[in-house]
Amino acid sequence: MLSILTYILLVTPSSLSTSYSDFLALLSIKSHITSDPRQALSSWDGALNDTNTPVPDFCQWNGVTCGGRRYPGHVTAINLQGYGLSGIISQDIGNLTYLHFLDLSSNNLVGDIPSTLGNCRKLYTMNLSANHFSSSIPSPLGHLSKLKIFDVGYNNLTGEIPTILLNITTLTILRIEWNSFSGQIHSWLSNLTSLTDLFLASNNFSGNIPAALFNFSSMDVLNLGFNQLAGSLPPDIGFKLPRLSVLGTEVNKFRGVIPASLSNASQLTYLVLRENQYHGVIPRDIGSHSKLNLFSVGYNKLQATKPTEWDFLTSLSNCSKLEILDLEGNKFAGFLPISIANLSLELNWLTLGRNQIAGTPSWIIRFHKLTQLILADNLFTGTLPEDIGRLSSLQYLDLSQNRFEGQIPQSLGNITQLTSLSLSNNFLDSSIPTSLGNLTQIEILDLSGNMLRGQIPQEILTISSLTKLLNLSTNSLSGTIPTQIGHLNSLGTIDLSLNKLAGEIPQAIENCVQLLSLYLQGNLLQGQIPRGLNSLGVLEKLDLSSNNLTGPIPEFLGSIITLNYLNLSFNNLSGPVPDTGVFCNSTILSVTGNSMLCGGPQFLHLPTCPSIRSHKASRNRLHIFIFCAIGTLIFCLCSIALYCFINRMITPNFVGREYLFLNRNHERVSYAELHEATKSFSPANLIGSGSSGKVYIGNLILDKNLATVAIKVLNLEQQGAKRSFLAECNVLKRIRHRKLVKVITVCSGMDPNGDEFKALVLEYICNGNLDEWLHPNTMTDGMISRRLSLMRRLHIALDVAEALDYLHYHIDPPIVHCDIKPSNILLDDNFAAHVTDFGLAKIMQSEACKKNHPEIEGSSFAVNGTIGYVPPEYGSGSDVSMAGDIYSYGVLLLEMFTGRRPTDSFNDGAENLVSYVKEAYPNNLLEILDVTATYSRDIDIQNIIDILIYPIFRLALACCHDSPKQRMKMHKVVEELNAIKRHAVQMF
Ligand SMILES: *[C@@H]1O[C@H](CO)[C@@H](O)[C@H](O)[C@H]1NC(C)=O
Ligand SMILES: *[C@@H]1O[C@H](CO)[C@@H](O)[C@H](O)[C@H]1NC(C)=O
């Protein structure tokens, strides 16, 4: 009655009959969205002048549906799926009491799920999946007694499932996968008798799986993967859950046998039991119902030794849709039944690795659609099929650790999609076919541990997609190392050890600037250690032992600070051993077996060199101490990195069916992954662009989480872009500070047109850059008023100063950023600042190195920076320096507090921002203060000037001093800002 009355009161007779309170709620929802990259809410328009003006017809707004005849003028559905919206959900959403359907999935929403949603009693679908919601599920949602579909998967939710939620007996789909829910599953599900789809995967649920879960006769999807659940599948599961189509228990602690009754579940499509402790024999009729598409039981303790125990494979040949068959890492042994050749020709992934299967797998040629074939670590014998090249879809081929013999087939070169090829540890004894040079997508090529003969074909050294590994170790390769090795400028590891390679190490090795590991030990190499190694600025492991190298040990090896393993033993090296860097840690260095060495650190016990300069000795000891300290630190960091890396390697991924192999070697991402993550680099995902490239937002699976990342694609046409990419990689690799944007990984390869493609995957900082906040565009920023308070500005200034202080004084060698400006300062949802864009950054040591070796770093690495922020001395050709960053920082401060860009034109005769401020300083500061900077009106403005404005401008001008020497140092800036902040906090 009351609602009819308000309805009549609020809506003028002639107007559209839309609800005023729904309208207010929608406006409130819009006002809490901070970024709407695809203009999803641009039609959500209207401000009420007074209650007599008609309410706009919001039923026409994008994503809004009204109730038609039944609930006229009331919002009954909101669908804003996948618009990239940022911000939070307004609590006022709970005023939409007629809401039946809510889908906000696949956005970038943060914060809590509003508890007021519990007021929307008519809701039957709530989909909030794939956002960044955190904290726990609010218990008022338990009042939604009509809810059928509840989907909050792929968020950051924690806590236990509120028990009240489990009284919603209408629930059919409960999807909470990919969060961090914990606790036991117990019997908490027992009321949800209507449940058909239960997605609990990838949380922290533990304990035994309750038997009650297997009593839901209408269950269709049961996905329990990636938890710590224990227990076993009931023997009669196939009779109790006859409609099951998906059963996932991967990566848990399930035991017992695979129940034979599963063959009764005639709809079973996905059966994923990988990485548990199931044992015994696979039921012989498992494939008798032909729907199976994915059969994955890898890494259990399953067995097949007698021929009859292989019968399941014969039954799987009924499954005409089988695409994935995964038996890896079990105790399958003996010969495969011939029925393997009858498996579905749709077979896409076949993984039989790490078993003891014997025989000659000539049947593989049948399966033309294979993209992944892993037979590694078995007892397969015979020669590789000559026409293996017919498997033209293969991307991942691993035949390593078997007993294959004979030739490497020429036709392998036809499989141009291959990204990873391993034939290692077999008995192959041909030469390396030059056709492998056609594998233009290959990232990993491992032919080690065979008996390969002949020379290294130069063709395989010019494959620019080789980014991860080239391993030809432990063969009988002869000849010299081709100079084409210098083309491998994106490769991480080269291993040519234990062959019969002769001649000198080519100087061209200097171009392999991404090398992390270089193994050339156990060959017949001669000549000196090449100077070119000095360019390998990220090298971590170098082994040149057991060759015939002569001449001195170059000093520069001691200053490659990333080096944590160096083996030069058993050569004919002579002269002094350096005593810096890697040379002062006995556990990571070996120089034994070189009879003519002298000097070096004490622990080597070498004779002193003939003409040592004694007056330097004490200084050297200090150096040794410092370098050892750094060495140890680096060693620790590398160990941590290695530990993290290994952890990543053994942490499996799972999304849909792409999961099985994602964890292999994903330290770098591929073009294809980025292409997908950014929806084909769609304009809708574009969040920034400039001369150096474009930045996209995308969703990538990283470390088993779907993460939102920023992807910076370099414009390689821009001069110096590759240098800039390398500079950025080199810088970002070394730094780790919460006020600096993290680089997650890099991509360096080809796009499908064969053009070079380089991209950085960066942490996504959600709140835009400082430039957008200081100079809001009234056209695009619409009704959201973007204003930064004075205090917020002060905090941002302090964050940036801390980041620069870190770069200048807390890492060795220091880094100069060279391009400090508002658009390179990103703000997160707490308005904390993160400094980004190291494309111009310089490592101070490479400067020093450039002076010593001008030929190494040509002059093309010119400094530019951004007009307005570049210090005056750069214009007159001065070297890049920390003082330059301080000048730019000073300009930034001035801009932040005046709201004027340094490139604005200033009347009053001021030629730039600095002189504009100087003219007003110190008496007229209020006149130049940014009018959009908000502050509490309760405080006397004179106090604000005295305590905040005046000291800030004083500080900024001290940073902008014309003479670089006179500028305030960054640690001093941090100190001063902290003092200003302390005073200001007391005032506000
Ligand atoms: C939503 O309802 C609450 C409680 O009735 C009220 O205080 C609030 O102002 C409403 N919000 C809007 C935007 O109308
Ligand atoms: C508010 O009033 C102004 C001026 O009368 C008018 O132009 C505008 O359309 C009104 N807004 C709404 C939403 O009615």
Image (cartoon, rainbow, N blue to C red):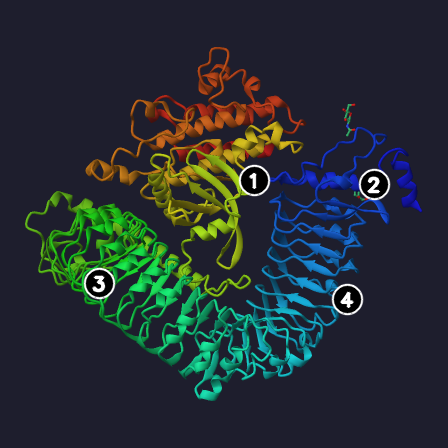
Q: Nearer the viewer, mark 4 or mark 1?
A: 4
Dot 4 or dot 1: first in sequence order is: 4
Give the labeled residue for mark 4: 169
Mark 2 = which residue?
A: 19
| Residue toward you, 909 or 969 | 909
Q: CA distance from mark 1 to mark 3?
A: 50 Å
Judge by depth and name the residue closer to the eye, 585 or 120: 120
In screen coordinates, is 844 left or right of 165? Answer: left
Mark before the other along the chain sequence, 4 or 3: 4
Identify whether 228 is placed above or below 260.
above
Above or below, 42 relative to 269: above
Q: What residue is shown at x 56% (from left), y 40% (from top)?
A: 767
Query: Where does the image place residue 389, in percent across and percent down from the top left?
Result: 35, 64
Residue 821 image position (x, y, % from top left): 46, 31
Determine which of the numbered discs, if any, sits on residue 497 in the image. Answer: 3
- Tell how many labels: 4
User: Does the closest atom of ligand 1 sit within 8 Å of the Cβ of label 4?
Assistant: no
Q: Amino acid at mark 1?
A: Asn
Residue situated in front as seen by the camera: 504 or 67 = 67
Task: Give, as a three-letter code, the residue at label 3.
Answer: Ser
Q: How far apart in space, not on screen, are marks 2 and 1 (Cα)?
A: 33 Å
Q: Which residue is mark 1?
A: 767
Disc 2 vs disc 1: which is toward the camera?
2
From where the camera sits, is residue 972 visible?
A: yes
Which corner quadrant of the figure contains ligand 1?
Answer: top right
First reached walking from the N terminus: tag 4 or tag 2: 2
Badge 2: how crowded within 10 Å, few (<14), some, or many (20+)?
Answer: many
Q: Residues within 10 Å of mark 1 (few under 14, many from 20)?
A: many
For the point 45% across and 64% down, the residue is 661
C-alpha distance separating marks 4 and 2: 31 Å
Q: Secondary structure at mark 3?
A: loop
Position of residue 224 in the picture relative to residue 623 (left or right):
right
